[in-house]
Every structure is written in structure tokens, then in C-alpha cells.
Image (tube, rainbow, N blue to C red):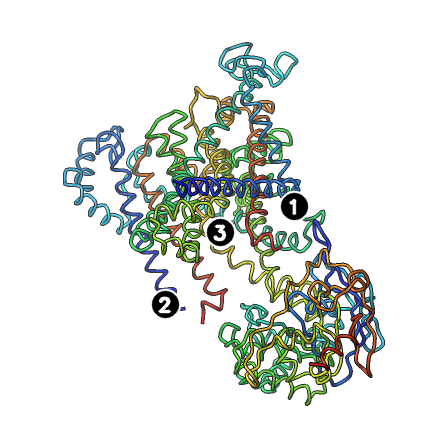
Amino acid sequence: MRTLRAQATTTVQIKEDRFWVYRRKISDFWRLYKRSRLGKIGLTIVLAFMFIAIAAPWIAPYDPFSFVGDPFLKPSSAHVLGTDQVGRDILSRVIFGTRISLLVGLVASAMTICLGSLIGLVSGYLGGRVDNLLMRITDLFIILPALPLMLIMASILGKGIMNIIIVIAVIGWTATARMVRSQTMSLKERPFTEASRAIGSTDLHTIARHIVPNVFPLVFANGMIAIVDAILSEAGLSFLGFGDPSSPSWGMVLYFADRAGSTVNGYWWYIVPPGICIMLLVMGFAFISYSTDQILNPRLRRR
Amino acid sequence: MEVRDLTTHFFMHEAVARAVENVSFTLKKGETLGLAGESGCGKTTTALSIMRLLPPGGRILNGEIVVDGEDLVKKNDLEMKAIRWRKISIVFQGAMNALNPVLRVGEQVAEAIVEKEKVSKANALRRARSLFELVGLDSSRVSDYPHEFSGGMRQRVMIAMALACNPSIVIADEPVTALDVVVQSRILELLKELQRKLSLSVILITHDLSVIAETCDRVAIMYAGRIAELGNVVNVYKDSWHPYTEALITAFPSIAGKRRRFLSIPGDPPDLTSPPPGCRFHPRCQWQDELCRTQDPDYRSVAPDHYVACHHSDKFRESVRER
Amino acid sequence: MRDYLIKRGASALITLALAIVLNFFLFRIMPGDPTRTVVGDFRVTPEIKQALIHQFGLDQPLWVQFLLYVQNLFVGNLGVSFQYRGTPVASIIFGRRLFNTFILMGSSIGVALIIGIIVGTIAAWKRESRFDIVTVIFSLVTYSMPVFWLGMMIILIFGYYLDAIPIAGTITVGMTYSNVFEYAADYLHHMTGPFVTLTVSFVGFYFLIMRDSILDVFTEDYMLTAKAKGLSNSKILFRHAMRNATLPMVSLIAVEVTYLFGGATMTETVFSWYGIGRLIYEAVVMADYPVLQGIFVVMSILVISANFCADIVYAFLDPRIRY
């Protein structure tokens, strides 16, 4: 009985120790991160947009879907960014657009990362024929022109937010897959992996306990880039008319702006704000990615 | 060359590493001076300070390095560029990465000549070829790439390169550490021969005391950024004045003589961002006392051309003699 | 090196084969009547319809269709377009459109590469200086801009407000030219907008990669050797660092080729530039599957050959592979 209890307490002790190790790693990371000016700016920008997205119904002056004024009104105190071609307030549409753009960006990139990591892990760990096959498929997806493929898929699947997310995820997983695979393969050769298998851990256990925690930091940094790609892809798809007209993302607003002939008529208030928003949000994530990369990538730290 | 009170610190984000402090020594013409010590004791930093090649964050805070009547510490970047390779050159360890993998070795040897002596590339390559022969390499290999050479041959290339502009001083930083023993001895032979032929003055940096014994005339034992003992090789080895020197030498296993257990020095080298007060070796020294813990020992001469930095070298030598 | 190229070439061919297979099946799984993929909803005479069905074997089992498809592919028969009433796809693609896209993309990629590489190198050298910070931020900003939005802004500012560039098209509609130069001038005038858009869009990425690569190279030992030799800064930077830094860039750029097509599509659509990118857009909107399929094949071939060329260039640049 005593030994059992001793065993139980030791297990709890180990679990607690692991918790503290992770906590320390995170606080170390945060300490280094705070030092990076770009990192802080990026984080601020992203948090600001998240706040806007959440608080949209309270911040936006009008309902983005209703017709609240005459069409093509120039900016005024009533409509800070004017109205679009059917009389909707542009500022409200831009504010609400934050929600869609962020949502698509985060969800699509999450799916991309998951899919890519899964394929990369399996491919890198199992090696051999499985690896060959998966890599050939990955190569194919890399070769195929991304945007045309996305357009075709979008036109097949039809309009809708979820479809756009699926399209982006299905096309974009290759970069993550490759990276995770090469990391996995190099980790597989390391002594601790051999040790883990030598004591009889199942493959799944080895992957989960040893490989995943070591791959995670790079995946995180890569994830930021995936978010950037997802946001830009969504904007591009929407702009070309394959987006969801009922959910006004920034790209969609620009689509309507283009349809209204804003460039030839000089409606700068219609064109500039959504574009700047996309740019800023992307920049925010790009800055975070840059700073995270500097910290997590050991080669960069040497510099 | 005369080095006086050289002090170099590394300024990092959170702390300052006091890598080298008050290091003084003289390099006589035609001699080989060894710089020995454990990893991290400041040998390479000293070499980089002399060449003014410190990485960002490293700064020479104090001291003079006098060569041909000029103080190198006071030189600006442009002046140092002129001095590098012409007066002093350096051979790095692990020539694996020290040679540029995308350029032919002959070009790498010749480019210094072309740049500094304004000769044509053809002439420089000719010189490179003769340098290759000097170091025992086939001169036709000047058009090969670094990855086509073995470790020992790459080191020869590095040596040939270091001699390209006829320097008077050559610093060799761990020149044979990465090589296997047989190749090691050949390279050391080569160095000795070259030094003789070209009347070079050499500073040989290594942690391997046997290499020092084979090649050096005098040796400086460094510890934690300072010189513990400096003198003629035979004297320092056989008749040490500093406890650390003796510990180092006895730690070295010897094939000859009685079999005995490994004697290592207890403890670890200090963290250079916060070195121990007083004598830096005191935590690991059996003769340490209150004085050692509070006061830095002076670097003083105890015999002609033999210097020691220790408070109790007399006591220590007494106990050695008793043994 | 020969083995390397053969291996790479074989790999490229296999990928090409797979791409063709994928291409075929991708369009066969489109929803709707299978004859749609070849004939579409467009009104063609029953004779033409029958001829096409026969030509593409739509009344035969799938694998026969595939063989017919490949056979047609080899003779350059890519089917006929819907929206252009039966014009052979091959003539649509391989005509003015391809030329226009090539000129536009070729020039902007070229210029962006040159600027990116040179400025990236200098920024890495002057790390943390004002030049570095400004260029890095500029690159991050342009990298974050959606390409089409940048195009719209350029049209807005330079087309609408400054009236400096034309808003759409490759040449002014309805104009006559007295000689080639006038034509070229008009053409280039129209190309300014999309050219600037694409170049600005690409340059940030190339800059950041090059800067990253050079900073990586700076940590290598041979850079210290180059500095130790007292070479001039430009020699160190361009001869030693850049040569090594461009190696990883070559492979990275090859992978990015597909994104270049995406950028071209957007830009051509915004500026109504008569090229392949815009053709893709039109074809998707009009559900002109034969054209799309044809473009896919052409693009796959282009990307695969671009990758293969990159492999060749890499082999050339890196002597470790060459020998």
C-alpha cells in the first residue's frame, strides 16, 4: 500500500514538475519577446483588431447590411467613410469586416497547420514508402498553381465562408508539411528518440511526448505565416468575386468597390480603408512571426 | 610583440563577461609562445583582441598591444586591415568551415596577395602554388575546392594561406585539435619547420599540454581570463610556481610511469560574468585562505623571465618539494 | 553532377506525369454532364459537338479518354474554348497572352530580384542601422499589402489623380502607330502600372530572404577568416558572403513560382492586362473548362521546368554538387 501511494505521489510530482518546466519556458519566451519592439507592435495591432472584431456591434455606427443613406455619399460627419453603391455605411462594413477576415484567417490557418503537421509528422516519422508517397502528393500540390486552383475549387463549392476556409486550407498545407517533416526527421535521429523507443514506448507515445513538443515552436512561428497567407488569400478570392457576398470581409468590400468603379471615379474612401486594414492586420501577424522566429530559431539566436 | 595589461570584456544583453583581464606577455622574435588553458579561459579572446577581430559586443577596455613600435589597440579599422595578414596572420581551428566552400582554395590563398600587394592574379596564383609546395601539398590542387580535401590537408591550406603575405607573426588557434593524432604530429612538424625556415614568431593556442610541450619555447598558462603562470616551457612544466599549473600537468595521464587514478581538478571554471572575488582560482585551490578570497594576486616575476600570479606560490612549492 | 541532374530530371518528369494525370481527373470530376468539360453549355452545331465528343472519346470509358487526352496533349491539341466559340485553346494561350504575361512577369521578377538581392545584402551588412530598419519595415509593409489593392491604389493615385498612367489595357484602343517605337512606347506606358505593382509586391519578399540568408552566412567561420585577411569590405561582402547566401535563395525562389502566377492573375485583372493571368480569371468566371485545363497543363510544365532550372542553377553555383 505504501509503495502504491509513493508511486502515486511521484507521478503527481513529475506531472507538476513538467508543468513548471513549461511555465518557465513560456515565461522565458515572453521575457525575450518583450524585448523585441517589432514583436510588441505586432501583438498590439493584432489585439486591437481582435478587440474591434469582438466589439463591432457596439463600435459600428450603423448596421452593415442595411441601407442607411443615399448611395455614393462622400465622407461626412454622418458617414465617416461615406456610403457604398447601395447606400450602406462603409465604416460599419469595414468594422464588421474585421470579424470575417480574422475568422477566416485564424480558422483556415489552424486547419492548414493541423493538416500540414499531421502529414509532416506521419511522413517524417514513418519514412520509407509512406514518406515517398506523401511527398509526391505534396510536391503535386506545390506545383499546381495556387490561385487558379483556389478559384476552381471556389467555383465548384460555391459561395460561403466555410467553403473559402476549406479552399484555403486544402491548398495551403504544403509549406507546413514540408517543414514539420524535416524537423521530425532530424528529431527522429536524436538520442532521446532512440532512448524512448528502446524502453518500449509505442510510436504514438514517442511522437506525442518527444517529437511534438520540439516541433511545436517552429510550427507556431510557421502558423503566423499561415495566418498571413490565409488572410491575403481570402482577400484575393473575395476581390475576384468568389467570396461570400453576405459576409462583408475586407476583400469583399473591395470587390464591391471595384464593381462601383471606385478607381476610375476616385472614390478613395471606399478603396483605402479596407486595404489599409488588411495591410495592418497582416503586418501585425508578420511582425509577431518575425519576432517569434528570432527567439525560437536557434540559428537566428547565434546572430 | 608586447602585450601589456590587455583587458577585453563582452557586453551582452543581461551581463558583461570579463573574458580577459590584465593579460601581459612578450613574444620574442623567432620563438613559439604557447597559450594554454581550459576551454573558455580567454585564449581565443586574446588572439582575437590582438587581431582586433572581436565579435559584436566585445570591446578592448584597456591595454596595449605593441608590434613594431605601434600600438594595435589604437588603430582604426582601416589601419588594422592593412596590418592584418601582412604583419600578423592567424590560423583557425577546424578548417572545415574556415574556408569558403564556394571558392577555389588557390583563389582564397591568392586574394590576400592580390589585395595587399597589388600584384596580378596570375602572379598571386603562382605564389599560391609555391606556398602549397611549402606546406607539403601538391601545387596542382590550387584549383580544387575545400570539400575535396581531408581535414589535415585543409589545415595545410589554412597554413599556406596564413603565410601568403609573409607575415612575421602567426597566431595558431587550436591548429591541430580537430585532427587525429597521426595527422596532428605531421602538422606540428610542419609548423616547426616553417617557423624555422621563415623565422616566424608564433603564438600557439591550445588546451592540449602535450602539444605545447612539443612545439613551444615558452608558455603562458591562462585561467579565467588571466595568466596564472608564464615562463620557459621546461621550467613551467617541471618546476611550476602556480597550483593550477601543477594540477593541469598532473591531470594529464601519462603512459610512462606508475599507473594512478585520474586526478582532475575539483570544481568548474568560473562564470566570467561574475567571477569569484580575489584570486579567480581560489574556489578550486587547496592553499586558499582569506587573502586569496579577497585580493587579486599580483602578476610578478619569481625568476628570470618567469612570472606567476599567486599569493602562496612559496608555500605551494614547499609542499611540492616535500613530496 | 551528372547523376544529380539525371536524378532531378527524372523526378521532374515523374512529377510532370502525375500533374498531367491530376489535371485530367480534376476536370473530369467537375459536377454536371461530362460533356460539359469539353463542349460546355455553349451552342455549337451538332456536327461539331459530335466531332468533339469523338475526338475526346467522351463516349468511351474513362481510361480511354485519358489516353486520348494524353495523345492530344502531345500534338498540342488542348481542346477548344467555349467562350471563344470553338477557337483552339492552344492558340488562345500561346499567343499574345503568353507574350504579354511573360514580358510583364519576367521584367518585374527580374527587377525585384536584383533590387532585393543587392539591397538585402547591404541591409544585412549595416544591420540595425537606419538603412536597415527602414528597408525592413518597407519590405514588411509591401509584403503585407494585397497585390490587387496595391494595383488599385496605383491606379487611383497615378491614374486618377495624376493622370500619369493609363488605367487599363495593354495598348490604347483604336490608336494607330507610325513605327515600332511608338507602339513599344505605348505598350510600355500601359505596362508601367502593372509592372510597378508586381515589382513592389515581390521585392519585399526577396529582400527579406536575402537579408536573412546573408545574416546566416555571417555566422559562418569562413567569414571570420575573410575578415582576418584584412580584405576590403566590398570583397568580404560580395565575394564571400553573397556567393554563399544566394544558394538557399535559389531553391526558395523556385518554390515560390506558383505564387507569382497568383500575383500575375490579380494584377492583370485589376489592370485589364491582356495576359494569361486574366485569362484564368475569365475562364473561371465563364466556366470555360478546356481553357482552364490547358492553362493548368501549361502552368504545371512551366513550374516544373522552373524548378528544374533552379536545380541546374544551384548545381552550377555550388561546387560541392558540381564535383
- Disc 1 is attached to a residue of which chain? C
- Seen in the picture, residue C179 relative to B281 is either above or below; the reply is above
Furthest residue toward right: B69
Q: Give percent across and percent down for residue C306.
A: 42, 53
Hey, what amino acid is under mark 3? Answer: Ile
Hey, what amino acid is under mark 2? Answer: Asp
Q: Give percent across and percent down for residue B80.
A: 76, 68
- Disc 3 is attached to a residue of which chain? C
Q: CA distance from mark 3 to mark 1?
A: 20 Å
Question: Could you say which quadrant of the image residue B248 lies in?
Answer: bottom right
The residue under label 1 is C135
- Disc 2 is attached to a residue of which chain? C
- Going from N to C along the chain, the mark reached first, 2 or 1, is 2
Within 10 angstroms of label 1, few (less than 14), some, or many (20 or more) residues? some
The residue under label 2 is C3
Q: Could you tell whether A128 is left or right of B122 in the image?
A: left
Name the quadrant of the N terminus of chain B: bottom right
The residue under label 3 is C253
Hey, what amino acid is under mark 1? Answer: Thr
Callout 3: SS: helix
Q: Are discs 3 and 2 less than 8 Å apart at CB?
A: no
Within 10 angstroms of label 2, few (less than 14), some, or many (20 or more) residues? few
Q: CA distance from mark 3 to mark 2?
A: 23 Å
